[in-house]
Amino acid sequence: MAKPLRILHCFRSPVGGIFRHVRDLAEEQSKAGHEVGILCDSLTGGEHEDRLFDDIAPFLALGVTRLPIRRQISLSDATTLWRGYKKIKSLRPDVLHGHGAKGGLLARVLGSILRVNRYRVARLYTAHGGSLHFSRSSPQGMLVHSLERILEFLTDGLIFICDFERRTYERKVGKPRTRSVMIYNGISERDFRNIPTRSDSVHFVYIGMMRDLKGPDLFMDAFAKTERRIGRPLSALMIGDGPDRDRYRAMMIEQGLGHRIGMLPAMRVHEAFSMSQNVVVPSRAEAMPYIVLEALAAGKTVIASRVGGIPEALGENSAALAEPDDADDLARVMAEAITEPDWGSRNMPNTQAIRSAFSASVMARDTLHLYHNILGLDGEH
């Protein structure tokens, strides 16, 4: 057994799927005997995220470093880079693993500065969608995709979390000029347990960030259209936090849906799953969203937009997939799900297939193998 690696995961916002991904990696890597830490934003997150940090704290030998990391590129990035460099240098990591566009920038730039100073460190990047969501033809898209291409020269390994992400990177940025692998997002064995619905459950639930990319407005629109399709009032919940929460609440009231759609703050996902059998994922863009994998493992019926890697989990020809950014088609699937007998059991993938393809232990094992490969330690793990 080689000496333990010192691994630092860098990302911006400690919310949503990236945070879930890093928590799972950190736990598995720590259990494998490595020393793990997190560097992330101090401007986002709330009480729910604080509880998640408490959960993962026992696995973080290198602790948690929080700095102000803004979503957009700004002058404050220079200060963040300098503070980040001083902290990272003091932690002496063997691996800097960046997640998302800003995390990838920090890990690769600061790792390269350490390399200039003759410090041996592996620089890795997992996009998680991020910059790949931008259109190739937009000015911002051209800028971020060009930056991604340049940053390849500072990258020892690229990890794609689904085949869709790999293909999108090749189409928008180019064929990788550095080492790259595809490693699916994975969930832990404890996620595989059926979660029954409460006696006061609703017909549909949306669980996620309250931002346009995730489609809460599409959920509300499709919900109203579903009611009209089947000719009776329904019930729903929207669970999550985010910058546009108040705007969605106002939109809901304006559309006369305030008595039939409730809103709750972010909570532990198993609590959210108890609210409904039907989990709707109306995203306009995704990579491989954890909410889909978690819902399937919990025995829930998933209704989702055909975006990102979702078809890789539900099946390319799944009846549960709706056309992207299309409330009418989403309403069609939602109506089928609650009116056709056994619709969910007929259209959801086999639990064992999800367990074998999307395992946190396999994800962590393959990621560690890449670290060792980059550091030239293949025979020592």
Image: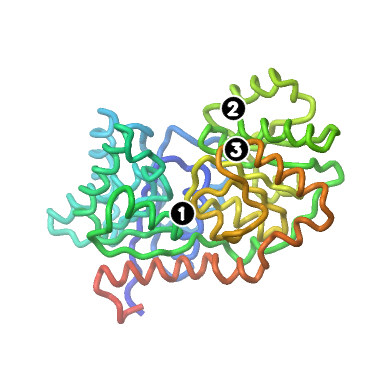
Q: Alpha carbon of mark 2 to alpha carbon of mark 1: how far? A: 25 Å
Quarter of the rendering containing residue 164: bottom left
Question: Of marks 1 and 3, which one's residue comes earlier in the chain?
Answer: 1
Q: Amino acid at mark 2?
A: Arg
Q: Position of residue 321 (x, y in %)?
A: 62, 51
Q: Disc 2 or disc 1, which is closer to the eye?
A: 2
Residue 245: image tag: 2
> What amino acid does circle 1 point to?
Val
The residue lying toward the viewer, choosing from 111 and 341, is 341
**Residue at (60% x, 23% y) in the render:** 246
State the image quarter where residue 117 is shown: bottom left
Mark drawn on residue 326 = 3
- 166 above or below 212? below
Residue 22: which disc? 1
- Tag nearer the camera, 2 or 3: 3
Q: Amino acid at mark 3?
A: Asp
Give me the residue at 66% from left, 54% from top. Answer: 295
In contact (CB < 8 Å): disc 2 and disc 1: no
Q: Position of residue 10 (x, y in %)?
A: 36, 49
Q: Residues within 10 Å of mark 1 (few under 14, many from 20)?
A: many
Disc 1 element: helix
State which quarter of the image contains the C terminus: bottom left
Q: Kindly state the secondary structure of the residue where label 3 is placed.
A: loop
Compute the Cα span from label 1 to label 3: 32 Å
Q: Earlier in the sequence, mark 2 or mark 3?
A: 2
Extreme residue toward the top, this view: 254
Please give the name of the residue rendered at 82% of the width and 52% of the height, measured from the top-left corner. Answer: 340
Q: Secondary structure at mark 2?
A: helix
Quarter of the image with the N terminus in it: bottom left
The answer to whether residue 27 is left or right of residue 12 is right
